[in-house]
Image (tube, grey):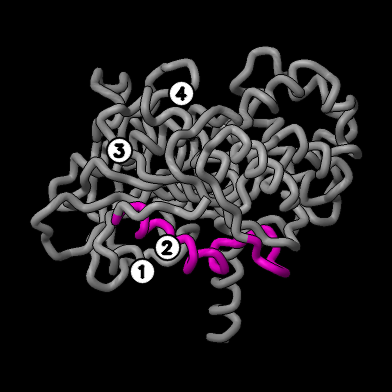
Amino acid sequence: MAISVMLAAGLYFAAVPQQPSAFYQPPQPLPKAHPGSVIRQAPSHASLPEGARAWRVMYLSTDEQGKPVAVTGTVVAPDKPSSTPRPVVAWAHGTTGIRPECGVSHTRDPYQQTPDVAGMLAQGWVVAITDYPGLGTPGIHPYMVGRTAAHSVLDMVRAAQQIPESGAGSSFVVWGASQGGNTAFWVGQLAADYAPELTLKGVAASAPALNLREIAAYNHDKPAGGIFMGMVFAAWDQVYADASLQAILKPDAADAFQRMIRPCFTAPAGFLPALADLRTPEEYLAVDILTTPPWPGLFDHNSPGGPIAVPMVIAHGTADTLIPIALSEQAVSRRSRRGETIQIIRLPGVGHDARDESAGYLMTWVRERFEGQGPTR
């Protein structure tokens, strides 16, 4: 009986995402303050690494149009004081979902999407982990809307600085995976203008989603692409006035579509009921998404192709079946021709989720940026 109860409880927690508490309800109206201002904070003890202290925070940020929005996240720092400001690693996590309960900071393990937090703390760094808008806080998460996500990362660094006990300074590296890799490159493009008081030292990414049009084309006939691209379509329907989800879905696919995009990757067993009628984008779309406006333009609009002045590194698995490594190679080649400092680390036989496999190398790369060492071109 006890074993059955334990198994049932384990399955429940694996399938049902935790609901955000009252902490995640923003005040109405939002306070009139600068982006990055902390609205509220509270100590966080969930899965706390040894020798660390952490806080949940709600802070102000701005969306793509510059409108204020409340965002939540986690700040974790070594528990020993520092005589100098600590460097900050701004972590941008990969896809968790598009609903409030798909956030990370309110879960039993707020570091579940972040590689080697203990290792970063051992280096004396502060780790600032945004949830992104609409994850934790109410609303639909503006998934793969690059500028909004970048603002939330930059304002997370600002929020960390407002917690004196963290010791967070103004020097930071942004590090992201998959969706967060897209965000990291957007941070690289926007940091100097959006947060000029911060000093960006480098951009690190594993399996980044850099070319959204090509990713959409590659995943057109793939079941996994049905979920990830479906989240894009549902989110952009809420962000862009001319991006209508109803206009592109086959009527008989609407219910299955909603079941596919509803679960959270923080509780992955929740996807099991949707697997029975999992559909590829070509099976649920009524249009050619690569030629039907406004979608091609939005793919390009949210792909970070602009100049980045700081060093960059990409780690990518050669066996990635969601975002082909060739797309990262193309980005590296294009930026290198422009004279930017970027390198790629190929991980033989590694699939899409390359966080753990790349963590050791990228940790060393981040440390070198904070120490002022010159990267290899």
Q: Secondary structure at mark 4?
A: loop
Q: Residue at x 75, y 22 (%)?
A: 295
Labels 1 and 4: the sequence-earlier one: 4
Q: For residue 193: magenta?
A: no
Residue under pointer 2: 363
* Amino acid found under the numbered disc labelled 3: Thr
Quadrant of residue 373 within the rendered picture: bottom left
| Cα distance between the residues tagged 2 and 1 | 8 Å
Labels 2 and 3: the sequence-earlier one: 3
Is residue 89 visible in the rendered image? The answer is yes
Q: Secondary structure at mark 3?
A: strand
Residue under pointer 3: 199
**What secondary structure is the magenta-colored segment mainly?**
helix
- Magenta segment: 346-371
Labels 1 and 3: the sequence-earlier one: 1
Residue under pointer 4: 63
Quadrant of residue 24 within the rendered picture: top left
| Cα distance between the residues tagged 3 and 4 | 22 Å
Outermost residue on the top side: it is 242
Would residue 87 be found to the left or right of residue 323 on screen?
Answer: left
Would you say the residues marked 3 and 4 are in contact, meaning their CB atoms lie under 8 Å apart?
no
Above or below residue 256? Residue 67 is above
Of residues 199 and 58, which is closer to you in this image? Answer: 199
| Cα distance between the residues tagged 1 and 4 | 32 Å
Q: For residue 368: magenta?
A: yes
Of residues 95 and 368, which is closer to you in this image? Answer: 368
Would residue 29 be found to the left or right of residue 18 on screen?
Answer: left
| Cα distance between the residues tagged 2 and 3 | 18 Å
Labels 3 and 4: the sequence-earlier one: 4
Tell which tag, 2 or 4, sits nearer the viewer. Answer: 2
